Structure formats: C-alpha cells, structure tokens
Image (cartoon, coloured by chain):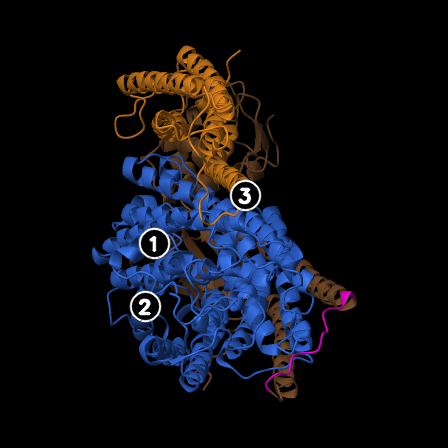
C-alpha cells in the first residue's frame, strides 16, 4: 500500500526531521484555522438562514477588540513560523566546517559528479553514511536545480556561478534525485539516484575503480599545463596576485571596490580576467574563455582552494 | 487674441471642473506608470554599474559629451517653451500658443537629430551591441552591456520624444481649429506634463550614461 | 428611479456589430471582455485537459516532452495574462464601477474601449504564436533558457503579453481616476462598497507593477534578438536579475488576481446575509495593505535561487506580514454571517467556497513562505496546489459567484437556480479532488513541469486527473445555461435579490446612461437595517 500510495517521503538526512517538524507545525496551524473557518461558515450558514423573505441581518457592524485579536494572534503565529523557518533555513544553508567537498556540473540533461578522490559519476551519486557532504555546483547551460526529496535539500544550479547545497545522509538506501528547475525538453528525465552506503562499503566502492588522481591533483596539473603558475607564484607577486588562502579573503579591485573572493569570482577571473582586476595589477591575464570546460574549472577551483590549507593557513596580503 | 471656441463637456462628467480634474489626475497616473517603466531600466543600470564600473567608465568615454551636453540644453530649453505654450493656452492666446508649440517641436526634432548623429557615430565605431560589436579594452563583455543599456535607455527615451513631437503636432492642429481656449486647455496641460517628464528622464540619463568617471 | 419597460437598455439601445465594436459604453465593453476572456479561459483550460491526460500515466506517452513543455507554458501564459489578471476588473469592474459610484461611465470611456482592443490584439498575437507551436519556456520564461536556448516563439509571445500589459495599465488608470473624481455627491470614501475599494487597490497594483514586466519583456526580446548579455551569464549578464525583475511584477500580479475577487466576495456576503460587512473599514484598509505589502515580497519566489540568505530572510518575514490582511478579511467575512439573514442562493455558495478554499490556499502560502520548508517544496506540486487553490478555488469561484449575482443586472434575465447550484457543487468537488492530492505529491517530492514521473506517484496523479475531468464538466454547465438564459431565461425585476447598492437602483439591464438622475448618497454601504426600517 505504501508503495502504491505513498503519503510522505522518507527521512534520510540529518535535517529531514527538523524540516518535517516545522512542516507539521505549519500544516497543523493551517488545518486548525481551515477547520475553524469552514466550521464557522457552515454553522452560521445553517443557524442564521433566512426565515422569511423580507428579513434582514441584525446590525452587528464590527468590534475593534476582535480586529486586534485576529490581527495580533495570526501575526504572532506567523512570526513563530518565520523564526523557526529561518533557523532551519540557516542550518540547511550552512555546511558544517570540514564537510567533504564534491563538485557538480549540471547540463542539459544530466548531472556530472566529481568525488574529491577523483571518481566521477553521471546521474548517480554514491555517498558515505553520516558524513557531511557539500556540493559546489554550476551549470554549463541553463538554470537547473539539485533536489533530493529524501534529504529535504534543494538548490538552483546556475550557469556562470557556483551554488552550494549540503547534507549528511542518515539512512542507507537509494533516493531520487530530481532536477527541480525547468530546463528544457528532457527536464523530467534529468534525474538520477543518490546511493547512501555504509562507510566501509563506500570505501570499497571508491577503490573499485582503477586508481584515479584526486580532484586537487587533476587541478594542479591543469594549473601548470595552462601556465597559471608562471604568474601566480608562491614566491613572488610581481605579475599576478598569490592565490594562497584566496577563497574567503577580501580582495581590493582597481577602482577601490572590495569583495570577498568566492568560487564564482575565481571562475569569472579565469574566463573574463578584465572584469575584476585586483588593485595594483595590470590587466595582463589572458582569458581562458572557451578553453576550459566547466569540469576543468571545478578541478582548478578545487586545487586553488587547497592552496590555503596546504600552506598551513598562510595568506599573502 | 481670445478664443472663440466653447468648451466641450464629455457625457460622463458633471462639470468642466470635474473633467479638468479627472484629465489631470489621469495624466499624473500615466506618468507614474512611465516612471515604473523607465525605473526598470534604471534598476538594471544600478545593478550592473557598481559591479563593472571600470568597463562602464571606459565605455562611457566613447560617448560624445559635447553632443550630449548640447542635447541637454536643447531639452531644457524645450521644456521652457512648452511651459510658455501652456501659459499661452491658459491665457487663451492662440498665436503665442502656436509659436511655442512650433518652437518646442523644433527643439524636440533637434534633439532627435543630434541623437541620430550620435547613433550613426556609434554604428561607424562598431559600438552597437550584437555580432558587429568591437571594443578594445579590458572587459569588452561588460562594455557591450553598457552600450546595450545606452541604446535601450536612450532609445526608449527617443521613442517617447517622437511620440511627444507627434502629439505637439496634433496640438498645433487643434490650436488652428480653435479648439483650445482659456476655459479648456486640458490637452495642452497634459502634454506639458508629459514633455517635462520626458525631459526629466533625460536629466537622469545624461550624467548616468555620459559622465561616468569624468573629472 | 426605475425606467419604464419601453425605454431602451444598453443592450438594445443600438443594434449592429459596429455599435458594439465602436461603443464607449462601459457596460458593452464589459460584455466584449466577457466574450474574450471566456475564449481564453477555455483555451487555457483545453491545455490543462491535455496536461492532466498525459499525467494519468508515469511515462510520457501521450505527447512528446517538447509538446508537453509547450502545453504547460501556454496553459500558464493564457490563464495568467489573458484570463486571471483581466477577468474580474475587465468584466465585473468595468460593468459595475460606474454604477456602484453613481456615475454615468468611467472617466475615460474611449481609453476603456482602447483597453479592450489592446487586450484583444495582444491576445491574437499570442494566439498566433500558439498556433505556430507556442513557447516552451514556462510562463515564467527564466533566462538564459528563454533568451538563448529555447527554439520557440519567445519574442512573439512576449510581444502579445507586452501589448496586453497596456490594457491592464489603462484599466487601472481609468478606475483610479473614476473612483477619485466621479463619485456621486455624498459618496465619501468610507461609504464606498468594498468592491470599489478592492478595485482601487487592484488598480494601484496594475499601474505600479505592469510597467516593470513590460520593460522586462523588452529586455528579454532585445537579448534574444541581438545576443547582448543582460541576463545571460555566458554573455556577461545575470540570470538572477531577470528573476528579480520578473517577480517584482509577477508577485503583485497575483494580488491583481485576488483583490478583485475579494471585492466580489464582500458584495456577495453582504447581499446574501443582508448585513453590512463586519469590520468594513478594516476590510477596506486590508485591501490597501495587501496592495502595498504585495510589492515587498517578490523574493519569496527565489529562496533557493542563489540569492543571499539574508535577503531570503527579509522576504520571508514580509511574506508573513502580507498574509495578515487576508486573514483579517476572512475573519470579517465569516463574522458577517453571524446573525445574518442568510439566503441559500448560488452566488453565496460560490462566496463560501471562495472563503474556504482561499483560506486553505492562503495558509499553504505560509508553508511556502516558511524558509526551512520552502527549500523542500519549492518547484514541486505543493506550490502548484497552493496557487491553484487561490487562483481557481479563489478567483474563479468569486468570478462565477459575481457573474451569477450580477447576471440579472447585466442581462435582465435569471439563470436556472437548480443547474447553477448543481454546477457549483460539481466545481467544488472537482476542484478539491484535482488539487488536494497535489499537496501530497508536492511534499513527496514530485517536481513541477514534469512530463514523466516515478511510478509511485501515479495514484495521486490519477486522482488529480479524475478531479480535473469533473471540474471541466462543472465549468461547461454554466456556459450552457448562461447562454440559454439570454434567450429563454426568466425576466426579472431590477433588484431580484433585494440587495442594497447603487447598482441595484438602476434598471436591470441599465439604460446606456445608467441613471436618469445621478443619485445623492446619504447613508453608508450595505444599509440593510435602514432598508428594513424603510420596509424595503
């Protein structure tokens, strides 16, 4: 029966229960007021039906007390919904520190996943149980949206920038992955499965393929192949700023504007380096527009992000 | 010279005063919609300018500040002549009304002519967004965005000017037919409001588009 | 006050197609709109039928994916822009606003006619685009899909919507000036019927919001035609900027759809309980509050879009605020029934249906406004159910209720009460069967705009499609009997309901000039107690 007529999704992530609890609260309030209103309507409808043709209603026109009551009470209830909702939302939006980083490139009409250990998957994502996992995602074409109902997570995946989603799976199993932002002809079929495995099983699965280089190592190779390292050097910043510890750092651009360097900024600076030049530098960086795929870009990104950590947190200027 | 026409009261109104007040309110409401319309374009500008200030400044320097300045003066002058036209209508002076309407039209056409010259220059310099766009500078993509906004905003403005000039022509016809009088000059007043609005839009457009990063 | 039987009414004062196509009589223009919106309603409904047929089975086997995408897009475009936004203001508003305020016409009758022509031209352009294959971007035409990737008639459809937008603007402009300047002597603001307050508030939204979608469509068209990068990141643009601009109009647009409906419901409840609306001033203020607050919440459509967490928080709390005035109205309508004199007539059935279904729709709006839950239900059938409860369970029910209530005023004929009650029941049952399962589907994770879906969702989809077939039948029946009543309906007196309101003091149907003498108003609205004292 459950399979024929499911009424509720499984809870398979650390936050699913808190989302459901919040949902039940809001639905509970909704049911209460719906029943209250419907019940009152039906009751009055019957009780005060017109008995003779010329009868009019009695001149009961209003009550300021009631108006205040039914303004303030719903306001208070909705503020609870808002506050609780914001709290859950912040948890959903903020991956815990140290979450394992996966990269996702979406395109019409498939999902491409990159494990940090180097393994790649298409439309299937294997993850270990209990480990917080952060997905950094971008699209090659139009807006998509990464949605796993059992985890209660969703985030739009945009071209030209990175968005993130995180979860910690709490139940082994196979869960639907859907694209949740209309993206063209095969939108309905742009889905797949997230398979949650016990950690030991996951290790076995990872090792199952012939040894691959990690994402960071692949990125490092691109970094030197494309000669990025000729200007972005750890020993001198004459030609290009150092990239060590860049992500999350505040950067000052020519013209005085400041911003926090994030993944999207790094990607833009590779593809359109003239757009946001760091103060004190000439705009001499060549553009790599059309030369790097989104997957290569996330590999580079992964490498650049690792620079801050491997240098022991040392950050230049 | 006083007018000889009698004011016409439309059937839905009870008095000329009600008619005048309604027409005036209607025009103001319409201008509010125009503010929201141009507001959308200004919003796009306001979002992109801080993000790509360099590119915008570099692109802006390709605009002809001299011609833009002249156009600004032309429009401000035309608002003056338009105001004089409204005043003439208010006083029932058909002769001066016609003169000021013609002057305003000429100034409007001058504006459009200069705009046309500017557009032609941009075409010759390959600065019209699209497949033929060429920009030597650090961020051609966002320079193109600037020009897209430039053409969209000044284009919309020019379209409103063209309509305005057309309406002025129609007002001229009405004046000659004696249909405007001191008792009924609603159309002139409404046109005046419209014309001033279009002028104010330009007052905002000019510094935002032409004067970026100029010292 | 009553016209003699010999005096012509607005329907038979002139004959011939040109007397209709060149009319400036607001009542005739309302009838012209009635014909146009009914056409678009059934066109949009036809697309819905095909959608629900496809969704009977999990596989995409009735139509191809590409076709399905065009179907749901055209269903949305037609229903939103060519039915829901204009329907009540253009049909009931145009007919009733002058009558309710004791005026002979709207302030600008020619602009009113122009408004209808603009609407029709825009509709025909869009219809032409549909006949040529339509659009497949979703009615929300998000970029860069709509500007760079779609291979369909985006610009043509956009042009149709662009044109029709001016119709909305002109209607709003006309109502605002009319309500400000053409009220009968003695008719102060707080003596106005709530229908007028509702249309005033709606008009504010129409004139402030519509121009923004107008310019957005222009920018989308420019980007699509010239490949400039306003919204496409591949060309340097920002897709989120499109979403902000789009929703800045499209959220207030839903208040354009619901505020007039609420105005109708106020009139129906007052008339069929024969009582002044409880808390009249609060309901009036609530309309204005909804219009204003409605402009501040657009970002709640973008909670998972990539906008900042802080922006999302602001939009969530504001969205909670906008729910309150609607709740106030629901409580006031319900309280109006207390100690009323309630007559069991079709219009009231629709009004009660509205109150119940709008309550459910509005409360589920709180679910989607709650950030933590919206992450899960965004872009699922939960949202689809939410907005259909309000637009179909709400607006369309109110429209039907109003159409039944004022049908005698508009045509001088009565519709058959038995069939009217029956179809109201059928619609209510069909509606709930169609859309309630969709709440369940949504929370289960069934995404929107899906052509094919996992098998476990089938039973719920079958229930929904079954409901849709019932709902469809429910909508067809009134078409038949309304048309029937034009010819064979019982002739009625000017005020068959014994209702209070200036529109009921004119003949049914009214003469072209509405009133022989402009009435002078000395009392408040819904003065039923006074009516009883006067033996009316």
Q: Nearer the viewer, mark 3 or mark 2?
A: 3
- Residue C361 percent across, percent down from the top left: 54, 69
For label 2, the crowd category at 10 Å Cα-Cα, with few meaning under 14, some 14 to 19 and many 20 or more, is some
Disc number for residue B18: 3
Rendering quarter of residue C275: bottom right
**Looking at the image, is B164 positioned above or below residue C355?**
above
Q: Which residues are magenta?
A: A53-64
Q: Are marks 3 and 1 on the same chain?
A: no
* Letter of the chain in orange: B
Rendering quarter of residue A261: top right
Colour assigned to chain C in the rendering is blue
Q: Chain of mark 3?
A: B
Colour assigned to chain A in the rendering is brown
Query: Is any part of residue C165 visible from this angle?
Result: no
Disc number for residue C42: 2
Q: Secondary structure at mark 1?
A: loop
Return the residue found at the far right.
A65
Q: Chain of mark 2?
A: C
Return the residue found at the far bottom.
A51
- Residue C314 percent across, percent down from the top left: 63, 49
> In the image shown, does C451 or C327 lie closer to the viewer?
C327
């Amino acid at each position: 029966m459950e399979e024929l007529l499911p009424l509720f999704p499984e809870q398979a992530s650390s936050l699913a229960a808190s989302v459901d609890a919040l949902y039940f609260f809001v639905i509970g309030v909704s049911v209460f007021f719906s029943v209250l209103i419907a019940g009152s309507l039906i009751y009055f409808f019957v009780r005060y039906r017109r008995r003779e043709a010329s009868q009019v209603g009695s001149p009961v026109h209003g009550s300021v007390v009631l108006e205040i009551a039914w303004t303030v009470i719903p306001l208070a209830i909705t503020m609870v919904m808002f506050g609780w909702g914001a709290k859950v939302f912040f948890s959903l939006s903020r991956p815990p520190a140290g979450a394992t980083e996966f990269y996702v490139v979406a395109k019409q009409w498939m999902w491409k996943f990159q494990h940090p250990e180097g393994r790649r998957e298409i439309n299937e994502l294997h993850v270990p149980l209990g480990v917080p996992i952060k997905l950094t995602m971008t699209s090659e074409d139009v807006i998509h949206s990464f949605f796993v109902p059992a985890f209660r997570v969703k985030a739009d995946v945009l071209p030209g920038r990175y968005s993130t989603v995180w979860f910690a799976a709490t139940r082994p199993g196979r869960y639907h992955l859907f694209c949740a932002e209309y993206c063209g002809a095969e939108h309905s079929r742009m889905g797949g499965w997230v398979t949650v495995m016990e950690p030991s099983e996951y290790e076995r699965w990872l090792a199952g393929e012939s040894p691959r280089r990690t994402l960071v190592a692949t990125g490092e190779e691109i970094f030197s192949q494309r000669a990025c390292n000729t200007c972005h050097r750890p020993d001198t910043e004459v030609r290009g700023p150092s990239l060590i510890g860049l992500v999350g750092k505040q950067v000052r651009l020519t013209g005085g504007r400041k911003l926090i360097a994030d993944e999207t900024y790094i990607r833009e600076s590779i593809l359109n380096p003239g757009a946001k030049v760091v103060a004190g530098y000439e705009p001499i960086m060549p553009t790599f527009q059309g030369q790097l795929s989104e997957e290569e870009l996330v590999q580079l990104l992964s490498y650049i992000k690792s620079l801050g950590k491997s240098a022991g947190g040392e950050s230049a200027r | 010279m006083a007018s000889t026409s009698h004011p016409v009261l439309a059937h839905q109104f009870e008095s000329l005063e009600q008619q005048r007040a309604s027409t005036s309110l209607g025009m103001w409401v319409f201008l509010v919609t125009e503010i929201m319309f141009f507001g959308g374009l200004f919003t796009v500008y306001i979002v992109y300018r801080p993000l790509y200030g360099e590119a915008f400044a570099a692109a802006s320097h390709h605009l002809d500040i001299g011609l833009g300045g002249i156009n600004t003066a032309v429009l401000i002058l035309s608002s003056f002549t338009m105001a004089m036209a409204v005043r003439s209508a208010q006083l029932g002076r058909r002769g001066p009304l016609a003169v000021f309407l013609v002057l305003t039209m000429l100034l409007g056409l001058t504006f459009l002519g200069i705009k046309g010259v500017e557009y032609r220059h941009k075409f010759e310099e390959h600065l019209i967004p699209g497949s033929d766009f060429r920009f030597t500078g650090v961020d051609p993509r966002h320079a193109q965005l600037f020009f897209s906004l430039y053409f969209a905003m000044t284009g919309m403005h020019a379209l409103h000017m063209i309509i305005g000039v057309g309406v002025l022509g129609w007002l001229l016809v009405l004046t000659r037919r004696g249909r405007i009088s001191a008792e009924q000059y609603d159309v002139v007043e409404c046109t005046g409001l419209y014309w001033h609005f279009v002028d104010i839009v330009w007052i905002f457009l000019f510094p935002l588009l032409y004067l970026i990063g100029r010292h | 006050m009553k016209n003699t039987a010999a005096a012509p009414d607005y329907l038979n004062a002139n004959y011939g197609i040109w007397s209709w196509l060149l009319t400036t009589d607001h009542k005739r223009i309302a009838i012209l709109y009635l014909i146009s919106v009914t056409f678009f309603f059934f066109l949009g409904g036809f697309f819905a039928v095909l959608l629900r047929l496809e969704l009977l089975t999990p596989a995409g086997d009735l139509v191809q994916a590409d076709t399905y995408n065009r179907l749901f897009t055209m269903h949305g475009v037609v229903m939103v822009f060519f039915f829901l936004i204009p329907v009540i203001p253009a049909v009931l508003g145009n007919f009733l606003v002058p009558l309710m305020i004791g005026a002979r016409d709207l302030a600008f009758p020619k602009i009113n006619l122009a408004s209808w022509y603009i609407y029709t031209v825009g509709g025909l352009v869009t219809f032409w685009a549909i006949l040529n294959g339509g659009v497949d971007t979703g009615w929300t035409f998000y970029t860069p899909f709509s500007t760079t990737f779609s291979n369909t008639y985006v610009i043509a459809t956009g042009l149709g919507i662009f044109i029709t937008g001016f119709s909305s603007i002109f209607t709003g402009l006309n109502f605002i000036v009319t309500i400000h300047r053409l009220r009968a002597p003695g008719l102060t603001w707080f003596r106005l019927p709530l229908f007028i307050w509702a249309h005033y508030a709606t008009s504010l939204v129409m004139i402030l919001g519509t121009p923004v979608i107008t310019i957005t469509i222009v920018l989308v068209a420019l980007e699509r035609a010239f490949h400039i990068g306003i919204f496409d990141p591949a060309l340097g643009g920002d897709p989120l900027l499109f979403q902000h601009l789009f929703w800045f109009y499209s959220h207030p647009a839903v208040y354009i759809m619901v505020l007039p409906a609420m105005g109708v419901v106020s009139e129906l409840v007052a008339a069929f309980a024969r009582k002044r609306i409880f808390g009249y001033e609060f309901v009036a203020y609530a309309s204005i509050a909804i219009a204003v607050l409605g402009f501040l919440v657009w970002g709640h459509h973008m909670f998972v879009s990539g906008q900042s967490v802080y922006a999302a928080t602001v939009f969530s709390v504001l969205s909670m605020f906008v729910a309150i005035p609607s709740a106030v109205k629901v409580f006031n309508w319900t309280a109006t029934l207390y100690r009323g004199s309630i007559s069991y007539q079709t219009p009231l059935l629709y009004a009660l249906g509205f109150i119940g279904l709008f309550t459910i729709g509005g409360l589920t709006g709180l679910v989607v406004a709650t950030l933590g839950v919206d992450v899960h239900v965004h872009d699922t059938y939960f949202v689809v159910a939410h907005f259909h409860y309000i637009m179909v369970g709400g607006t369309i029910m109110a429209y039907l209720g109003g159409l039944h209530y004022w049908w005698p005023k508009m045509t001088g004929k009565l519709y058959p009460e038995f069939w009217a009650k029956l179809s109201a029941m059928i619609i209510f049952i069909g509606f709930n069967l169609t859309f309630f399962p969709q709440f369940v589907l949504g929370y289960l994770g069934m995404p929107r705009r899906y052509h094919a879906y996992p098998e476990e969702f089938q039973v719920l989809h079958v229930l929904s499609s079954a409901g849709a077939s019932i709902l469809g039948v429910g909508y067809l029946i009134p078409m038949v009997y309304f048309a029937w009543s034009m010819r064979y309906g019982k002739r009625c007196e000017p005020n068959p309901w014994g209702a209070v309101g200036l529109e009921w003091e004119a003949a049914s149907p009214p003469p072209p000039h509405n009133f022989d003498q402009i009435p002078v108003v000395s009392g408040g609205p819904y003065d039923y107690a006074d009516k009883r004292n006067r033996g009316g």
